[in-house]
Amino acid sequence: MKLLSKQIVIFIGICIAATTVYAKDVNSLRGSHPIEANSKKPVAKKWHSDQAPIKREFVHQPPLVPHKIEGYVINTNSNKCLSCHSWANYKDKGATKISLTHFTDRDGNDLANVSARRYFCTQCHVPQVDSKPLVKNTFKPVKSIMGK
């Protein structure tokens, strides 16, 4: 039992040492700004104006929001997105209707209304703004989606 305890202590020591060595190479997006300090107020970005639907770059990518959503209320009592994108309203509004997948619960049961797990649209669907990437991105779209 003592041998096992010593091995565990040595293993934990190695893990701590390795973490300390590798942690020195990690750069935070906050820079040298300590977490406890107040952050600067972010600069407001310019939302893209209304535009045609944005093409998808990979399979199962949630569609991007091609219009401003500033001021939209999406909470447990209200969902502004559904005023245009629901099956009842999409034709009159000229909007894309929400997918049938949004009417299925986690157990695969079909529902009459949007599932609670799909109700908060901006968890997956995001509007676009003019901004620089926070980190370098080398992503390449799937060729089959690009029609190549």
Image (spheres, rainbow, N blue to C red):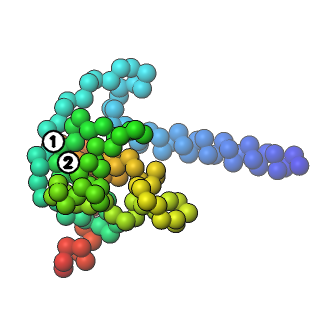
Residue for point 45% across, 55% down? 115
Do tag 1 and tag 2 residues touch (Cβ < 8 Å)? yes
SS at badge 1? loop
Tell which of 86 and 43 is nearer to you.
Answer: 86
Residue for point 34% across, 49% down? 121
The quadrant where residue 142 appears: bottom left
Q: Position of residue 46 (x, y in %)?
A: 14, 38
SS at badge 2? loop
Q: Position of residue 33 (x, y in %)?
A: 35, 26
Amino acid type at circle 1 is Trp
Q: Position of residue 138 (x, y in %)?
A: 26, 59
Write down the residue under mark 1.
Answer: 47
Classed neighbour count for the residue bearing mark 1: other residues with Cα under 10 Å, few (<14), some (14–19), many (≥20)? some
Amino acid type at circle 2 is Gln
Q: Is residue 142 above or below residue 63?
A: below
Write down the residue under mark 2.
Answer: 128
State which tag comes first along the sequence, 1 or 2: 1
Q: Position of residue 17 (x, y in %)?
A: 58, 41
The single residue placed furthest to the bottom in the displayed view is 148
Tell which of 98 and 52 is nearer to you.
Answer: 98
Tell which of 137 and 106 is nearer to you.
Answer: 106
Q: Is residue 25 above or below residue 56?
A: above
Q: Is residue 92 left or right of residue 8?
A: left
- Does residue 64 appear in the picture of this structure? no
Residue for point 22% across, 42% down? 69
The quadrant where residue 36 appears: top left
